Amino acid sequence: MTCVEPLHFDDLDGIIEPMPWMQQSRVATALVESKSGSYAVAGGGNKNDLLQSITLTWLNDTPVVQLVWGEVRRGGCRVSLQARSRGFLTVREGVQLGVTAPTLTAADEVSKFGTGMDVGQGGFLATDTGLAISDVRDNSRRHRLLPGSTGRWEVAVGQSITVRVEVRFQSEAWQSALITGGSEGTNSNYVSGDTAVDLFAVPKF
């Protein structure tokens, strides 16, 4: 006869195996599809548009305390802007114990990807803007949830943890005057790839 701790191990037909909650495992996942869009190349003012948002909650329904951490996965991205606009795809992240999603602000920004240039002068006095496109692309990648934090979040039995991730298109300058020679061939657009969040847990010993 084999004696095991039933909270930690399973003894089925003499085969001892750890319980599912006693192993590292992915406990929750969520994904939003890619998003693309475009703007008028001139006018309209600065942008601050929410493109993608994920709120993911996991309840620790295991009989032991769990240590939780996460990963954020991003598909390929692209930002293409007519000078003299400067814009970015920004990612904000937050984590909070409980079922209430954290409110994200600019202080929660963890990454920024984009482009822009102050060239392409046109007109008789070279004070206008001519055709000039800045284009930048990024491969798919992943990073640790809240990369600036250390350690893992301790989630008690019966407690929940909630994660929120937002992707925004923001600009710090936007071309205001019409393009010299017309806007044919110009563009100001973006592609923000699929965004996913995975939560993992290991038991606290």
Image: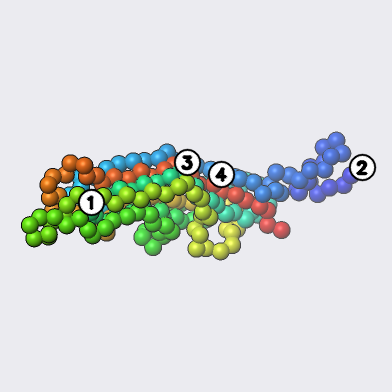
Q: CA distance from mark 2 to mark 4?
A: 37 Å
Residue 86 lies, in percent from the top left, at: 27, 56
Residue 46 in sight here: no
Secondary element type, mark 4: strand
Query: In terms of sequence position, does the residue under pointer 1 or pointer 2 come before the other?
Result: 2
> Residue at the spot x=49%, y=56% of the render?
95
Q: Amino acid at mark 2?
A: Met
Tell me the crowding category of disc 4: few under 14, some 14 to 19, or many 20 or more residues within 10 angstroms, Cα based: some
Q: Which mark is residue 132?
A: 1
Tell me the crowding category of disc 3: few under 14, some 14 to 19, or many 20 or more residues within 10 angstroms, Cα based: some
Residue 80 in sight here: yes
Residue 93 lies, in percent from the top left, at: 44, 55
Quadrant of residue 174 within the rendered picture: bottom left
Q: CA distance from mark 4 to mark 3?
A: 11 Å
Q: CA distance from mark 4 to mark 1?
A: 44 Å
Residue 44 lies, in percent from the top left, at: 18, 50
